[in-house]
Image (cartoon, grey):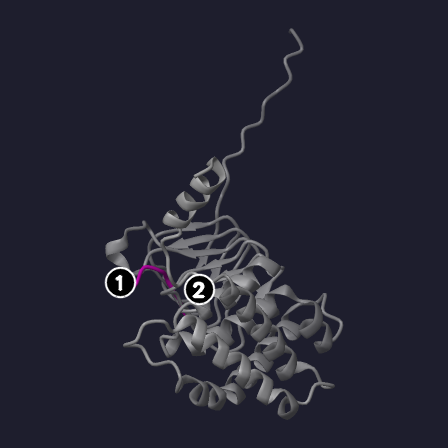
Amino acid sequence: MDSQEIIINKIKQNKIQPNLRFRLKRETEAFTDLLFLSLFDIETPFRDNLPKLKQQFDLLVNLACWDPEKSCGSVWEDYFQSLPTVLESLNLDAQAIADCDPASLSIEEVYLAYPGFYAIAIYRLAHELYKHKFPLVPRLMTEYAHRQTGVDINPGAQIGKSFFIDHATGVVIGETAVIRNHVKIYQGVTLGALYVAKSLSNTKRHPTIEDNVTIYANATILGGETVIGANSIIGGNAWLTSSVPANSKVFHTPEIEIRLQDNGI
C-alpha cells in the first residue's frame, strides 16, 4: 500500500461521526432564505412557495432526524400553523424599530436594511422549531443569521413582543434568557451566564429582562437569577451580576486619570 492510500485510510478511520452531513447546513440556509422571502416579499406569493417549503423541510427531516426514537415528520403541520402568529410578532418588532430609531426613514427600510430585524426574524422562526425539539436545524438557522448580522441569539431564548435591537453587531443572547415586551438593546450587549459548566445545561443560566427596559451599548448582564426590573435603563458598558429593581438607572462610571505633561519644571 502506497503512502497516499495509508493517509486516505487514516482519514477514513478518523471520520467518526456517521451523521455529520454538512449538506444539512446548506439545506437549512436555503430553507431559511425561502421562508423569509415568502413571508415578507410582496412579489412572492406564499401559496406558490408552500410546496417547495414543505419539500425542503422534508429534506431537513431526513438529514437531521437520524435518532430512530425521535419522530420529526409531524412537526411541519404544527410549524406551518404557527407562521401567522410569528409573522404578526415580527411586524410588531419592525414597527418598534421604526418608531424608536430616528434614523429609520420608512418601515420598508427596517425590513430591508436593518440587521437587528433580520436577526430577530430568523430567531423567531427558529424558536418555533426549538420548541418542538427539532434537532440541529434551529441552531443552524440562528447561526446563519449570526454570520450575516453579528447578532448571536440562541433559539432557546424567550423573547416577548416589540423587541428592538439597534445597530445589532456584537449582541449575544443566551439560551435561557427571558426578555419581556417592549425591550430595546443596543450593539455589543451580552445577556450571558456567570460561568460555563456542562452540568448546568438544564439550568436557567441567563438573565431575565422585564418590560420596557433599555440596555445601552456594550452592557453585560450575567446570571440566571439576575432580573432587570421593568422600566429600567442600563447604561453603556455596565457590568451586572445581580438584580436591579423596577424603574432603576444603572450607569458605568469610568475612572479618569489626567496626566500632566512633564515640562521639566
| Circle 2 SS class | loop
Q: If you read the primary sequence from the N terminus, does the residue marked by circle 2 or circle 1 appear first?
A: 2
Task: Please give left or right for residue 29 compared with residue 64 in the image.
Answer: right
**Relative to residue 48, is residue 206 drawn left or right?**
left
Q: Which residues are magenta?
A: 202-210
Residue 176, placed above or below residue 96: above
Q: Is residue 15 left or right of residue 30?
A: left
Q: Residue 116: which quarter of the image?
A: bottom right
Residue at the outermost left position: 199
Helix, strand or loop status at disc 1: loop
Q: Amino acid at mark 1?
A: Thr
- Identify the image quadrant of the N terminus: top left
User: Which residue was labeled with disc 1?
Assistant: 203
Q: How many residues crowd around disc 2 within 10 Å: few (fewer than 14), some, or many (20 or more)?
A: many
Q: Check residue 206 for magenta coloring.
A: yes
- Which secondary structure class fits the magenta region best? loop
- 116 relative to 262, above or below: below
Taking the spot 54% from the left edge, 57% from the top edge, the residue there is 216
Q: Is residue 236 left or right of residue 155?
A: right
Q: Position of residue 143 (x, y in %)?
A: 51, 61
Disc 2 target residue? 154
Which image quarter is the C terminus in? top right
Question: Which residue is outermost to the front?
Answer: 1
Q: Is residue 79 visible?
A: yes
Q: Are marks 2 and 1 in contact (CB under 8 Å)?
A: no
Spatial CA span between label 2 and label 1? 15 Å
Up-down: is 74 above or below 110?
below
Q: Who's the residue at 43% across and 88% down the image?
A: 78
Residue 23 placed where, x, y %? 52, 65
